[in-house]
């Protein structure tokens, strides 16, 4: 019972931390100002870098071989997305511009990293995978409902559309791993 309550509490914390990031970001993007392409580029790179950072923590701390393998995929895939995004931004002459959304993402990352760093073994594995489910759900939602619709440059928009299935694949992988912890 205690473990279940702890797990729910940890999951709730991860959920609040990650969903709030992009929900708040979504709210900021929709209610205050429309994001420009340089701001969207910054959000895309920042969101991917955050997941690389989470993956690198998991590579050091994960107990399960499956979780480590998942983390390796996250690092590799999200670094590849960043590389492509930076190359496209350079080609288009777009300099990513930090904004309220990127600031919110980075603030949330600090909290999640602090929580993950306090955990060990199976507790870490569960928390990391739960965070990945929540984070990918939030990122996919933001990409589909905010970033793609607000992107003006067609090449940038197509890149976001192109990476969405990979993000969805990550989500499914995370959900399958998470199911093993239940």
Image: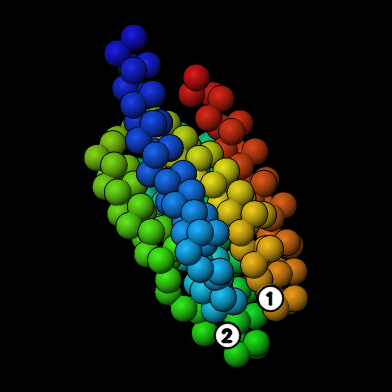
- In this view, 162 is above or below 96: above
Residue 76 in percent (x, y) is at 56, 59
| Residue 67 relative to residue 4: left or right | right
| Helix, strand or loop for disc 1 | loop
- In this view, 6 is above or below 100: above
| Residue 62 relative to residue 147: left or right | left
Q: Tell me what residue is drawn at x 61 percent, y 49 percent.
A: 141
Residue 71 in percent (x, y) is at 50, 48
The residue under label 2 is 94
The N terminus is located in which quarter?
top left
Residue 9: image quadrant is top left
The answer to whether residue 48 is visible is no
Residue 79 in percent (x, y) is at 54, 65
Q: Which of label 1 and label 2 is nearer to you?
A: 1
The numbered mark at residue 97 is: none
The residue under label 1 is 152
């Amino acid at each position: 019972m205690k473990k279940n309550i702890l797990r729910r509490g940890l999951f709730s914390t991860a959920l609040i931390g990650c969903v709030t990031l992009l929900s708040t970001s979504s709210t900021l993007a929709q209610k205050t100002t429309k994001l420009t392409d340089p701001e969207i580029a910054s959000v895309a790179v920042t969101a991917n870098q955050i997941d690389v950072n989470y993956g690198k923590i998991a590579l050091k701390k994960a107990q399960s071989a499956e979780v480590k393998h998942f983390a390796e995929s996250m690092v590799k895939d999200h670094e590849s997305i960043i590389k492509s995004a930076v190359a496209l931004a350079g080609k288009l002459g777009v300099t990513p511009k930090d904004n309220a959304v990127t600031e919110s993402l980075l603030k949330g990352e600090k909290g999640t990293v602090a929580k993950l760093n306090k955990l060990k073994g199976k507790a870490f594995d569960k928390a990391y995978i739960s965070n990945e489910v929540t984070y990918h759900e939030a990122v996919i939602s933001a990409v589909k409902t905010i970033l793609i619709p607000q992107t003006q440059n067609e090449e940038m928009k197509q890149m976001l559309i192109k990476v969405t299935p990979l993000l969805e694949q990550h989500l499914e992988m995370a959900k399958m791993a998470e199911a093993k912890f239940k």
